[in-house]
Image (tube, rainbow, N blue to C red):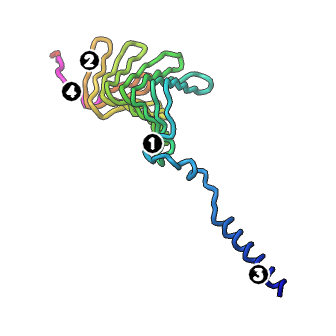
Amino acid sequence: MQKHKLHIIKNTVIAFAMTLFFACKSNLKDVKQIGMSANDPVGVSDSINLKYTDSGRLSANLISPKMYDYSNRAFSYSEFPEGVILHLYDKNDAKTTIISDYAIIYNNTDLIDLRGNVIAATPTNDSLFAEQLYYDQTKEWLFTNLPATYRSKGYVTSGRGFDSDKDFKKAEILGVTGQFAVQE
């Protein structure tokens, strides 16, 4: 009888321990989320100076006073609420500089959304003025569907959009507007 009671107690303890063992799961993500709102950034950085290289050659440099990292989201992104300076370098190290008041980098699409007083200046002193400009890092392409003004040697062109490679060799104003002098 004593053996039987001991056997029942032993099996009960084993069953209880197994229940506890399988009930607890190790989920590090849940532990990291404790005390963090879903709307809060996972990190905040000051004085950012990111350099992108391609085959050992500097291809871009992003500078910003502040960055919020939202890589904890399903569609992760980095936000630059105090603006950015983005330098784009061609194969000859000629630099195009783009500045904006605000920017977002969408990590899944490699798209940079530059907003607010966007100004782009090329090595040949051409310049672009827009309220919003996208830079596709994969295709190395700049574009917007909002009003833009492009100033180049001797002329100013305004339109309802802009499309160009990062070197501004294929720059095009879309939906050109304004007054034009026509010679007959």
Q: Does the magenta portion include 180?
A: yes
Q: Kindly identify which residue carries mark 3.
A: 8
Q: Kindly identify which residue carries mark 2.
A: 156
Q: Does the magenta portion include 126?
A: no
Q: Earlier in the sequence, mark 3 or mark 2?
A: 3
Image: 72 above or below 68: below
Q: Kindly identify which residue carries mark 1.
A: 40
| SS label for mark 1 | loop
Q: Earlier in the sequence, mark 1 or mark 2?
A: 1
Within 10 angstroms of label 4, few (less than 14), some, or many (20 or more) residues? few
Q: Mark 1 or mark 3, which is nearer to you?
A: 3
Tell whether label 4 touches label 3 (CB within 8 Å). no
Q: CA distance from mark 1 to mark 3?
A: 52 Å
Q: Earlier in the sequence, mark 4 or mark 2?
A: 2
Q: Earlier in the sequence, mark 1 or mark 3?
A: 3
Q: Earlier in the sequence, mark 3 or mark 4?
A: 3
Within 10 angstroms of label 2, few (less than 14), some, or many (20 or more) residues? few
Amino acid at circle 3? Ile
Tell me, yes or no, if residue 7 can be seen here: yes
Q: Mark 1 or mark 4, which is nearer to you?
A: 1
Amino acid at circle 2? Val
| SS label for mark 4 | strand
Amino acid at circle 1? Asp
The segment highlighted magenta reads 173-181
Whole-percent x, y for residue 67 in the image: 46, 31
| SS label for mark 2 | strand
Amino acid at circle 4? Thr
Image: 2 above or below 94: below
How many numbered markers are drawn? 4
**In the rendered image, which quarter contains the N terminus?**
bottom right
Tell me, yes or no, if residue 60 can be seen here: no
